[in-house]
Amino acid sequence: MRTDRRSPAIRVMAAGLLGVCLSLGCGKGDAPSLNISTASTDGSGAPGTGSGSSESRLIGTWNGSFVMHADAATAEFDSATLTACKSMKIRIQFREGHAMAMTASMVLPEIGEKTNASEGRWEVLGADGDTITVRSTEDGADPEEIVMHFRGTDLFEMTPPNQLKALGTMRFTRE
């Protein structure tokens, strides 16, 4: 039997979206990927800011939600998937000493709100201009790389999984 080693917060989002997609149909029949990261930069070519300033930039509490693109091709997705995406909320605390806490929730039609919380560790793997790559290791889960694209000091965005990136982005603001 295979043990699910993804982070608890990622599991609640993935299970919710996967359940919605499998039970109600979602786009071209592909289930969303269970990895929320991408490996891209902002393309500015600007030198990295160094891990010290990148780390201090992350310290604090961040509240995230799914933001739909204005031109999203919503016709490819059923209403249950759209409802789940629009309700997705994530709260991340990046603490000094590389500790972190994360809570994720979403509303699933016919099920209601699903929430999961986890603790873990984080470290900056690299920075390129306003793009910071972090390794997140939540308790009991395999490490995951998260790519954050900063838009100023109090806002960053992350690309959601697989086909959902066509709908929008996860946007985090500092609390």
Image: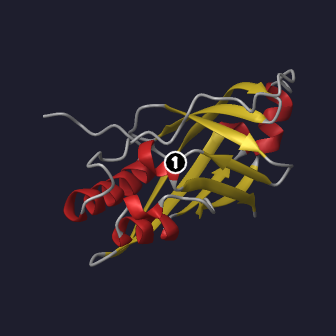
Q: Is residue 101 above or below residue 54?
A: below
Residue pictured at 86% horizontal, 49% vertical: 152
Question: Is the residue 47 above or below the residue 25 in the image?
Answer: above
Relative to 34, does residue 107 appear above or below in the rendering?
below
- Residue 54 position within the rendered picture, expressed as x and y whole percent measured from the top left: 80, 34
Q: What residue would you read off at disc 1?
A: 165
Q: Nearer the viewer, residue 130 or 21?
A: 21
Counting labels gives 1
Q: Position of residue 121 (x, y in %)?
A: 57, 38
Locate residue 91: give its quadrant: bottom right
The x and y percentages for residue 85 are 47, 63
Q: Amino acid at mark 1?
A: Lys
Q: Nearer the viewer, residue 128 or 68?
A: 68
Label 1 Cα crowd, 10 Å radius (few <14 / some 14-19 / many 20+): some
User: Mark 1: which secondary structure?
Assistant: helix
Which x, y percent locates residue 34? Answer: 38, 42
Tell me what residue is drawn at x 43 percent, y 72 percent: 83
